[in-house]
Image (spheres, grey):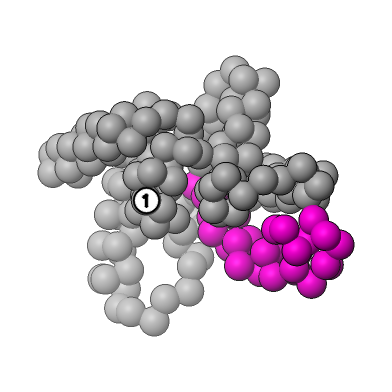
Amino acid sequence: MLAYARGDGDAFAELYARHRTRLFHYLLGQLRDRSLAEELFQDIWHKVINARGSWQPEAAFATWLFRIAHNRLNDHWRAAKHRPAAPADADERTARLADVRTPELLADEHIRRQQLQQALAELPTEQQEVVILRLEQELSLEEIGQITGVGRETVKSRLRYAMDKLRARLNE
C-alpha cells in the first residue's frame, strides 16, 4: 500500500489480486446477494484508492481492508433497516453448482449446506460476522477485533456462542 501511495500502479494491482477473492466472498456471505456484493465490493476498492495518500501501516493491509468492508456493511444495514432474506432462488442456485460426486452425496451435501446456511442466518449479525471472518476468511481473533472494532475477548465470546448455537441447531 505504501508503494501504491507513492504512485506505483503495479502495487495496487498486486493488492487487488491478493485480496479480491477473500473480500468478495466475505461480502457475499454477509449479503447473500451477488449484485449487491459486487456493488459494495466496488465501493470498498474505491475507498482504498481514495485513501492511498493517507494510509498509515498501523495494521496489516488485509485487516484495514476488512475494516473498510465491515464499516461499509454497517452503512448498508443502517440504510436498509433490515437484513434481507436469502434470494428466492437460493436452492436452485445451489443445486446448479457443478459437482462430480454421486447424486446421493450431492443431495446429502445440499441438505447439510441448507441447514448450515439457515443456522447461520438465525445467528445475531455480530456472531455471523465473526464466524465468516474466522472460518471463511481465516483471520485471527486480533484481526477480527480490529475489523469489527471490539476486543479480542469479545470476538472469542461471540465466536464461542455462535459455534455453540450452530452445533445445537445442526444436531437437532
User: Which amino acid does the dot numbered 1 rest on?
Assistant: Ser
Residues 132 and 108: in front is: 132
- In percent of the image, x 39 and y 57: which residue is there? 138
Q: How many marks?
A: 1
**Is 169 drawn above or below residue 38 in the view shown?**
above
At which x and y percent is residue 89?
A: 54, 47
At which x and y percent is residue 56?
A: 67, 45
Q: Over which residues does the magenta segment extend? A: 1-29
- In percent of the image, x 70 and y 58: which residue is there? 1
At which x and y percent is residue 94?
A: 46, 58
- Magenta highlight: main SS: helix
At which x and y percent is residue 9?
A: 83, 67
Residue 149 visible (yes or no): yes
Q: Which of the image's four quarters has the C terminus?
A: top left
- In percent of the image, x 28 and y 32: which residue is there? 153
In the rendered structure, does residue 151 fall within the stretch colored magenta? no
Q: Secondary structure at mark 1?
A: loop
- In percent of the image, x 61 and y 67: which residue is there? 18
Q: Pointer 1: what residue?
A: 140
In the rendered structure, does residue 15 fall within the stretch colored magenta? yes
Left or right? Give the position of 9 relative to 160. right
